[in-house]
Image: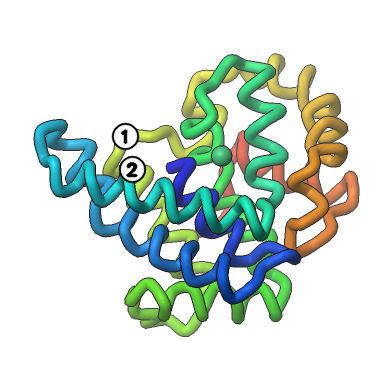
Amino acid sequence: MDVLTHAIEAYSSLDNNPFARCYAAKAAELVFKSLYDSYVDGHDLNAKASMQIASCMAGIAFNSAGLGITHSLAHAIGAQWHLPHGLANAIVLPYVIEFNGQDPYTASVYGRLMSAMGLLNISGNAPQMLRKSVETLKSELNIPATLREQGIEERDYLGAADAIVSKALKDTCTATNPISPTREQMRMVLDTVYYGLKKN
Ligand SMILES: [Zn+2]
């Protein structure tokens, strides 16, 4: 899921470029094709090889294009509750797609990524389709949808939220997020990461 986050964030980053997008789109496509198979059958070497290639390609992409606030929040959340990096990114990613997708240009970028991956955009709402594709993959991999589902107590969340927002705003990955979030917006995204979206 970290690989998928690298691919989606590099593709939509402010420092994106054709070179990075090419690698990012292929990496995301390979994750959607192979991560589930790799997860359910540890002996499926074709799926494992595909994920290894996807990981390298997404790494090349973000090395040149940078990342976004999924990583900024995941860094702070992972440190706060000792969650592995991939798990923290997987929990955060759909909510950042929802937030960044409110920007019309970023929504069109998500649409281009979906076409490049060969995912049909049936509804015409690219951010929603991309978010739902990530949510489906998450549930297939038995990853909790929210921090609350992960088992973080609400009082622990409320006690730590301000500090997480401060760290995320200062994180180097925030500079290349397609939208530069205010403190209030970062808190709003974090609240959805904890509680989930009110409407789906
Ligand atoms: Zn990462």
Residue 198 at what x, y percent from top left? 59, 51
- Amino acid type assigned to the residue bearing label 2 in the image: Ser
Cα separation between marks 1 and 2: 5 Å
Q: Answer left or right for 110 relative to 69.
A: left
The residue positioned 33% from the left and 76% from the top of the image is 118
Q: Position of residue 150 (x, y in %)?
A: 48, 25
Task: Provide the secondary structure element on which disc 1 rests.
Answer: loop
173 vs 131: above or below: above
Q: Disc 1 marks which amino acid?
A: Asn
Marker disc for residue 58: none
Badge 2 element: helix
Q: Is residue 137 left or right of residue 98?
A: left
What mark, if any, has residue 142 been given in the picture?
1
46 relative to 132 in the view: left or right: left
Q: Quadrant of ligand 1?
A: top right
Q: 157 above or below 39?
A: above
| Quadrant where the N terminus is found in the figure | top left
In this view, the residue in front, 27 or 128, is 27
Is 129 above or below relative to 8? below
| Cβ–Cβ under 8 Å for marks 1 and 2 | yes
Residue at image x 80%, y 38%?
171
Q: Quadrant of residue 165?
A: top right
The residue positioned 45% from the left and 46% from the top of the image is 3
Disc 2 crowd rating (10 Å Cα; few below 14, some 14-19, many 20+) is: few
Label 1 CA crowd tier, 10 Å (few <14, some 14–19, many 20+) = few
Residue 108 drawn at (x, y percent): 60, 81
> Which residue matches tag 2?
139
Q: Quadrant of residue 89?
A: top right
